[in-house]
Amino acid sequence: MAKRLTDYNLSDLYKWIEAGQSTSAPEEFIQYVNLLEKIYQMMNRVDIYGSKEAIVKHLVSFEESLKGNRIKAIDLYNESFEYFNADDKISKKAWRKFYAAKLDQDYEMARAVSKDASDFEKASRIADKAYKFRQLDQEDPPELPKSMFEKPLKVYTMDMNQFDVVNEDLTDIENWIDENTKELSPKAIDRIKQEAMILPIKIFDDEKPDGSN
């Protein structure tokens, strides 16, 4: 038995998307998807529909497939909201723009019905909220140079002649080590001289100075 528009839900829509959005989808399913989009557009027309309740009443009254079916109208409203707002990767900046745009609509509607200075003052407060939603009352953060996000170049070497800084004279270094490490054991002193590149580096303790075993 063929499905009616009211038999479909978001799981059917997600399956259709995963299957590659086939153009051979049933007409009732296409109507369901189009109705979700229509409801979402109604959500963004605050000046006309105003609230969830107003949209549900409109659906029950004027959508042939939903006439008298308030429960399904509410389901479709919720499905539309979930489908078009489910992306948790939306940035805070995008959400600020979204809600600021709604405040813009409220501001225009408030100005349209204003009758005296008090009403215009209330409309101005809405505009001020939109202004702050967009963070226009705050200074833009300083733009960081791209170089700060580049991986630093690391060079591991003990030969300072590779740079603009030259090596100290090895004889002077050895004399300084001999003078200032008298309290250390010969083995510890040799290790310091190896690290200073005065003696050949021994990787293993039983290795001979010439590198042979």
Image (cartoon, rainbow, N blue to C red):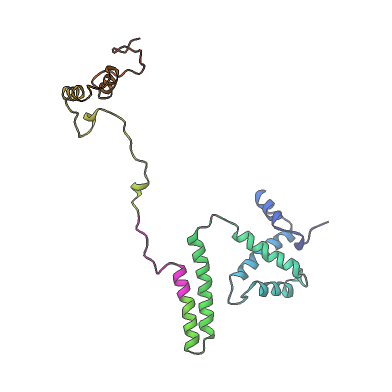
User: Between residues 135 and 178, which one lies in front from this camera angle?
Assistant: 178
On screen, residue 168 versus residue 86, left or right, reads left
Magenta range:
128-143
Quadrant in the rendering for residue 190: top left
Measured from the top left, where is residue 34 in percent x and y? 67, 63
Quadrant in the rendering for residue 182: top left
Measured from the top left, where is residue 133 in percent x and y? 47, 68
Measured from the top left, where is residue 84 in percent x and y? 61, 61
Please give the name of the residue rendered at 33% of the width and 35% of the height, measured from the top-left corner.
154
Please give the name of the residue rendered at 23% of the width and 33% of the height, measured from the top-left corner.
163
Query: Dividing the image into 4 quarters, which one contains the N terminus?
Result: bottom right
Query: Dividing the image into 4 quarters, which one contains the C terminus?
Result: top left
Q: Is 124 placed above or below 16 here?
A: below
Residue farthest to the right, as pictured: 1
Please give the name of the residue rendered at 63% of the width and 59% of the height, measured from the top-left corner.
83
On screen, residue 144 versus residue 198, left or right, reads right
In this rendering, does residue 78 appear at all? yes
Please give the name of the residue rendered at 53% of the width and 71% of the height, measured from the top-left corner.
102
In this rendering, does residue 20 appear at all? no
Decide whether the magenta segment is chiefly helix, strand or loop. loop
